[in-house]
Image (tube, grey):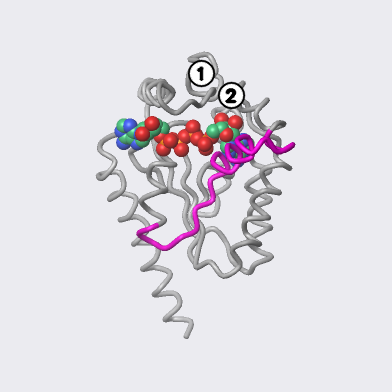
């Protein structure tokens, strides 16, 4: 199994790159942002609760997103691997994910972090807001709040994976194709290492 986390601030290209990587590596894409937006579109009680947080640029409570991920892992029992996009976003979410994967006798194998300057992020999100209809992308104050939340609550998650020697930063500015190639190069290295370890074990 191969489990990857795509990490980075709002608008760094996690969703964009995930779409390319899941087809290349045959992974199941788990985006908490997409899952929450689908609950909002269906007007479920979970979606109505989540919208209040997302519209303000705040994180949805941990127990809600952890429950969603748990359900998805159960739904895809036979998957060859997962790409976690936008999850975990807090230290509690990271600890919960370790436990959920341990129960399934697997783990996170690689965390790739897209690095993009704040000015570029604001530009991208305001641009996306013109067409996406996403209420969290149209107001610059909400976007700035999302960055503050990222710095305070999400950036420390990197330490969790650095301590496990699984974390690698990748430049997130440039063409989508070039960034995808850089991510692919790193994934191939990890897969090659996994293959050698497996061979040595057999
Ligand atoms: P998410 O849906 O995860 O999205 P995001 O961080 O806004 O964007 P992403 O990094 O995926 O950027 P994208 O590829 O789209 O989160 C939304 C909200 O959901 C959060 O604020 C929070 O409230 C809630 N939420 C989600 N997960 C949660 C969790 N685990 N816990 C609690 N709350 C949670 O790219 C952005 C734009 O840039 C696009 O328009 C794209 O076309 C453009 N772009 C991409 N790559 C580019 C490049 N190389 N050059 C130029 N433009 C590029």
Q: What stretch is highlighted in magenta?
A: 23-47
Q: Find out if the beta carbon at label 2 lies less than 8 Å from the nearest ligand 1 atom.
A: yes
Q: Name the residue under label 2.
A: 57
Label for residue 64? none
Looking at the rendered image, the disc whose residue lies closer to the viewer, 1 or 2, is 2
Q: Determine which residue is flagged by label 1.
A: 144
Residue 12 visible, this orientation: no
For this orientation, the residue located farthest to the bottom is: 202
> Was residue 160 drawn as part of the magenta stretch in this picture?
no
> Does dot 2 land on a helix, a strand or a loop?
loop
Residue located 59% across and 63% down the image? 76
Q: Residue at x 50, y 68 (%)?
A: 80
Please name the residue shown 62% across and 56% down the image: 72
Residue 146 shows in the view: yes
Q: Does the residue labelled 1 lie within 8 Å of ligand 1?
A: no
Vertical placement of residue 12 versus 161, above or below: above
Rate crowding at label 2 as few (under 14), some (14 to 19) or many (20 or more) other CA atoms within 10 Å.
Answer: many
Q: Earlier in the sequence, mark 1 or mark 2?
A: 2
């Amino acid at each position: 199994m191969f489990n990857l986390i795509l990490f980075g601030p709002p608008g760094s290209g996690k969703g964009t790159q995930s779409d390319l990587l899941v087809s290349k590596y045959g992974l199941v894409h788990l985006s908490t942002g997409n899952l929450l937006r689908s609950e909002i579109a269906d007007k479920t009680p979970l979606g109505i609760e989540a919208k209040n947080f997302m519209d303000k640029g705040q994180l949805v409570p941990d127990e809600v997103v952890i429950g969603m991920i748990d359900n998805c892992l159960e739904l895809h029992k036979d998957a060859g691997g997962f790409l976690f996009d936008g999850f975990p976003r807090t230290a509690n979410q990271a600890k919960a994910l370790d436990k959920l994967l341990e129960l399934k006798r697997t783990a996170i194998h690689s965390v790739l972090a897209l690095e993009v300057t704040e000015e570029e992020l604001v530009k991208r999100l305001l641009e996306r807001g013109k067409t996406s209809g996403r209420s969290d992308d149209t107001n610059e104050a909400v976007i700035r709040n999302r960055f503050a939340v990222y710095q305070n609550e999400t950036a420390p998650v990197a330490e969790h994976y650095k301590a496990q020697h699984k974390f690698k930063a990748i430049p997130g500015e440039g063409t989508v194709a070039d960034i995808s190639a850089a991510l692919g190069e790193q994934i191939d290295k990890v897969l090659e290492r996994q293959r050698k370890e497996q061979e040595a074990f057999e």
